[in-house]
Image (cartoon, rainbow, N blue to C red):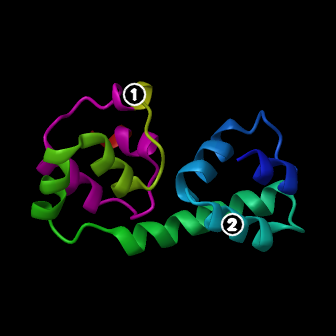
Amino acid sequence: MERVMKSLKIDAKATELIAMITFLFPTNGEKERLIHECAEMNMKDINKYVFEYRKQKIKSTMYFSITEFNEYWNESRKKALERLFQEPLHESKLRKMNIDHSERIFQIHSKQPYDIRFMNFLLYL
């Protein structure tokens, strides 16, 4: 991650962006692609690129049914939600979720914009 930050001139204070990049671009190859694609961009454009990439990942990893979501939920609630939202969810964020019923979560999520952020989604619970 240090190489990405140095190459793209990302300030260490940009913790949300750094966390999102770490989550969305887990392999060295993906990080290198990010560096290549964003080499001449300013911070605003890098942020836009990362969040557009997040939208693409949401579309390509969507759950097709409540049954599929439940299967992942039963294996790991955190991983199921991270796949649903395509963003890193630390325990402090997860503790804010006041519902633990996977079908209800899926139903509420399916009525929101597909790319809703987790913290915004919590407002609908």
Q: Who comes first in sequence, dot 1 or dot 2?
A: 2
Magenta stretch holds residue 50: no
Q: Position of residue 59 (x, y in %)?
A: 41, 73
Q: At which x and y percent is residue 36?
A: 79, 72
Q: Residue at x 17, y 46 (%)?
A: 75
Name the foreground residue: 12 vs 107: 12
Residue on which the image places disc 1: 91
Label 1–label 2 contact, CB within 8 A: no
Residue, far front: 28
Q: Which mark is residue 48?
A: none
Whether the magenta-drawn stretch holds residue 109 is answered as yes
Query: Please, what secondary structure does the residue beneath circle 1 have?
Result: helix
Q: Is residue 38 above or below residue 86?
A: below
Q: Which segment is the magenta one?
A: 94-122
Label 1 and label 2: CA atoms lie apart by 26 Å
Label 1: how many residues lie within 10 Å, few (<14), some (14-19) or many (20+)?
few
Q: Nearer the viewer, residue 25 or 63?
A: 25
| Residue ID at (45%, 61%) | 115
Residue 84 percent location from the top left of the image: 34, 56
Amino acid residing under circle 2 = Tyr
Q: Is residue 93 left or right of residue 103?
A: right
Circle 2 residue: 49
Please, what is the three-letter code of the amino acid marked with disc 1? Glu
Query: What residue is drawn where x is 42% and y is 45%?
Result: 118
Task: Look at the picture and state if 85 lies above or below 93.
Answer: below
Q: Quadrant of the C terminus?
A: top left
Please state which of residues 36 and 82 is positioned toward the viewer in this rendering.
Answer: 36
Nearest the viewer among 116 and 64 is: 64
Q: Is residue 102 left or right of residue 108?
A: left
